[in-house]
Image: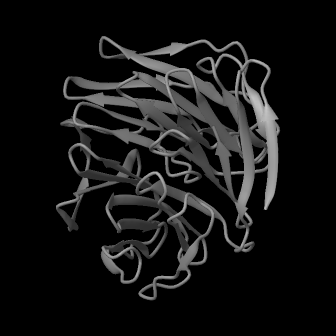
Amino acid sequence: MKYLFFILSSLSFAQTYQVVNEEKPDVSYRGLAFQDAKTIVVSGSKNTIGKSIDAGKTFTWINPKIVEGRDFRDIEVLGKDNYLVMGIDSPAYILQTKDGGKNWEKVYENKEKGVFLDAMYLDTKTGKITVVGDPMSPDKPFVLTSSISNTKDWKVTTNFHGQPFRLKNPKEAFFASSGSNLYVDNNQMLLVTGGVLSNLYYYTPKGGQLYALEKTKSTTSGINGLAYNPTLNIGYLVGGDYTKPEDSKYNLYKFKIVSGKITFQDSWSYPEGYKSGVTIIDKDKVMVCGYKGVDYSTDGGHNWKNITKDSYNTCIVSPDKKYVILVGNKGKIGKVIL
C-alpha cells in the first residue's frame, strides 16, 4: 500500500493519499458508489464487482455468473445490499442484487445491434432511475427510465420533464468514462455530450435549453462528466481529450442555475490535463480526476493543487465527507483522506 502525505499551502490541514487496492491489475474500474460511510461498491471490466465494508481497507470480489465478460461501467446503490450494475454493450444488461452480491438477476437486457449504455443516475428522493445510452437513431439518445419500486419495468423515453429531447448534431454522443453524464431530479435534468460537438442540455417542465461548450476539433474531446449539488446550487463539468491526456484545454466548467437558466462562472486557473470525474465536497471544496492525476480546490475551483499524478477515471466523496474514493485502470483504487 502506498501512502503520500500532502500539505497544501492554502490550507490549515492536510490530505493523505493512498493506493488502497491493486489486486486486479487486468481490470479497468469506472463504476463507483457508496452504501454508507464505510461500505463502497466498485465495478469494471471482466465481469468484476468489488465491495468494501471497511472504507476501502479490504475488498471482496464478485463475479455475477448469470453473464460473462461484461464491462460494468456504472453501479448504483438502491438501498442496503441492493445494487444495480450496468453492462454497456450488445448485449447490454442491467443486473440487480438484493443481498449484497451473493445472487443476481437480469432486470434489463438489450441485444439490439449498436446498443451502448453510458451512465445511470438514481434520484434518491423520488426513487427514479435514469439510464442514458448512445443514439440508436439520428439525433435521439437512447434513454431508459425505471424506479426503485419496480426495477424490472424499464421504459424507453424520448422526453425529459415532458420536453421532447433531440441532440443538436446526430454525431454527438456520451463518453462512458465515469458514469456521470447526467443529473436528474424531480424538477430538472442536466445532460452533457461530447464528440463532434459538446453541449450541456438543461430540461425543466417549463422547457429545454442548450448551452454550447468550447472544445477542440477532435471528435475524442468534450465533456465527460458532471456533478451538481442542488442544495448548494453548484455544478462542475469536466472533460478534455482522452487521447491527449496532458492537454488541459476546455477541461473544466463551473456553473450555477439562476432564474431557470445556466450561469457559468470563471475560474482563475484549471486542473492539469484531461479529466473524467468530479465530486463536490462542500461549497468551496471539489476534487477532479483523470488520466493525468487528481486535483483539489478549496476555493470553489479558482485555484488547484495536484494531489497525485496517478491515473483515475471516477471519484466520489464519502457520505460523511471525510474521504474520497477513486477508481481507475489497471485495478487501481485510491483514497484521499480529507
The answer, for residue 272, to whether it is visible in the render is: no
State left or right for residue 59 relative to residue 106.
Answer: right
Query: In the image, 151: left or right of 323?
Result: left
**Considering only vertical position in the picture, is 277 above or below 149?**
above
Q: Is residue 79 visible?
A: yes
Q: Nearer the viewer, residue 246 or 21?
A: 21
The residue sitting at 73% across, 42% down in the picture is 16
Q: Is residue 158 above or below residue 200?
A: below
Q: How many marks?
A: 0
Residue 159 percent location from the top left of the image: 25, 42
Q: Is residue 12 left or right of residue 204?
A: right
Q: Quick one: quadrant of the C terminus?
A: top right
Whole-percent x, y for residue 299 in the image: 62, 17
Residue 155: quarter of image: bottom left
Q: Return the residue found at the far bottom.
A: 65
Name the residue at 23% across, 31% down. 187
Q: Position of residue 135 (x, y in %)?
A: 43, 53
The coloring applied to the image is one colour
Point out residue 188 in the picture as x, y percentages from the top left corner: 28, 31
- Residue at point 58%, 24% (across, down): 253
Against 208, residue 218 (above or below) is below
Quadrant of the frame with the N terminus = bottom right
Front-most of residues 161 and 307: 307
Q: Foreground: 297 or 336? A: 336
Tell which of 12 and 183 is nearer to you. 12
Relative to 232, does residue 245 appear above or below in the rendering? below
